[in-house]
Structures are given as structure tokens and as C-alpha cells.
Amino acid sequence: MSDLHLLQYQFDVQGYLVIENALNTNEVAALNRLLDKQQLPAPGQTQRFGRAPDGPGFLEWGQPFCDLLDHHRIMPILRFRLGDCFRLDRIYGMYMRDGMGRGKLHADYGATSPTTGAQQGEYVPFRDDQIYNGFVVVTWCLTDTGPGKGGFCCIPGSHKSNYKLPQQISEAPENAANVIIPEAPAGSAILFTESLTHGTAAWEAQHDRRALLYKYCVSHVAWTAKRVQPPSNAELTPRQQILFRDPGDPYRHFPSLFEDQVAA
């Protein structure tokens, strides 16, 4: 429990976590072999593959992709971020080759979000000391990423900022001291809140970048009206099946993922 308390504190302060060795070398190799079979086109204008909602996306490509849905290394962390009732909202993969440029720094919630000016409803009581964002991303690194290579980048602690991202940082994040590229060897899982200002650093490594992104949210919210669909050719556990449910009020219309009867 003490380890979880440490992770909870680090996630709260940083807005992200890197869990190294979440997958062993055999698991990473198996996932990469399945990706090789897809004969994906060379990354160019787009860096994404196997995306969903609206279908099963890359989950249709083999059981190992489904095994990541509720992997034992991420579920305790998702629980203290999202509670007992959460669902899978979106998935996609990312791949890059040497020389590909960076993506834009962004945050989907908070001061930098494009929805900042939207009129918000009121809650009773007002939850001044509560976290309002209910989206967490798990990025599974299938190749080494980090400084000198590229990949996931972010501004640690920016999920708590009350000010929009300054233009100087947005236009040249590679020159900003507070933008970092955390070290994440192959087999690592990077978890981060969508309120964190994050992006993709230019890829400078000789090997290709390969990453799988699983995006989870609290049970009663959704990003879009479309849904990720369960794959037709995989064996899903009862708990994994819950992750594909439509949005619903926790406990009342959406069951806990941590009850004994649905535990993996």
C-alpha cells in the first residue's frame, strides 16, 4: 500500500507517471510481431493506426492487445485516479520514424483546453477541493522513448495551472526548460491525465517509435457519441467486458471494476 501512496502522490504532483517494466521482453516482442503482420504503411501525414471509437480498432489484431485493457500494473493506479467505475473511451496507436516532426502541445481540460470558455453547469454541493477531469491515458511503449529519441513530452504540474499555455512555449517547446521528454524504455507504461499539457516530441532515434494508447474515463462521461466495440475474435474477462459498456452513473447503472465477481 505504501508504494501506491507514493505513486498517488507523484501522479498528483506531476500529472503523469512512468511505470517501467510493466511489460516483459516477451510481451513486448509478441505485440511488435502482431504489429508487423499488419504491414502498416510508412508513417507520413498521420502517425496513428488502429484507432477507435467506432469499432474495435487494433483490439481486433490479437489477444495480447486485449490483455492490456485491465493489466494488473495499471488498474490500481487507474482506480485512485478514476474510482471504482470507469470505462474505455478511445484507443489508437502511434508510430514515427527518424526525422518526423513534433506534435502540438495541448491539454483537453483545464486553462489551456479549447472548451475553457464553455458555459459549465453547477454541481450541488460545489466541489472546490475535487478533481473535475475524469480522463486518464495509458501509453504502452513498445520501443524505447526519451531524451535524444522523442515521443511523449509534457510540462509536469501543468494540470494544476490556472493560466493558458504561453505562446512562446507553444511555438517552440523544444527550447522551453519546463517541457520534458521522460525516459520510458520499451515495456514502460506512461499514465497521464488529459488535463496535463502534453504532446509528441520530434522523433530522433534510429529505431521506429511504436506506442499503444488506451484512454479511460469515469463511467458517466464520454468524449464522443461513438463507442469502442469489443473485438469479435478475443476472449474477454467479465471485467474487460465492463470497460466496453455505455456511460452510466457509477454503481447505479455502471458496476464496479473491483468487485470480487468481476476481478480478473
Image (cartoon, rainbow, N blue to C red):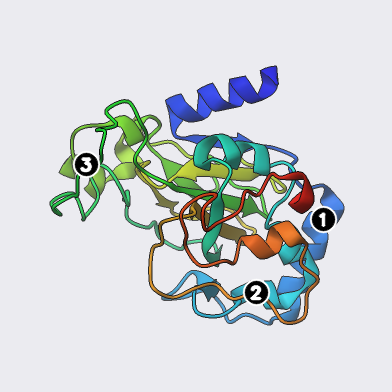
Figure check: 129 above or below 253? above
Residue that label 2 marks: 230
Q: Label 1: state its secondary structure.
A: helix
Image point (40%, 60%), residue name: 101
Residue 229 percent coordinates (x, y): 59, 76
Instruction: Work out whether residue 264 can be spotted.
Output: no
Residue that label 1 marks: 27
Figure check: 149 above or below 254? above
Q: Earlier in the sequence, mark 2 or mark 3?
A: 3
Give the residue type at disc 1: Glu
Which-is-in-front pick, marks 1 and 2?
2
Within 10 angstroms of label 1, few (less than 14), some, or many (20 or more) residues? some
Give the residue type at disc 2: Pro
The front one of 183 and 212 is 212
Which-is-in-front pick, marks 2 and 3?
2
- Give the numbered dot on residue 111: 3
Q: Earlier in the sequence, mark 1 or mark 3?
A: 1
Q: Residue furthest right?
A: 26
Which-is-in-front pick, marks 1 and 3?
3
Figure check: 210 above or below 10? below
Q: Earlier in the sequence, mark 1 or mark 2?
A: 1
Q: Is residue 130 left or right of residue 27?
A: left
Residue 187 percent coordinates (x, y): 72, 47
Within 10 angstroms of label 2, few (less than 14), some, or many (20 or more) residues? many
Give the residue type at disc 3: Ala
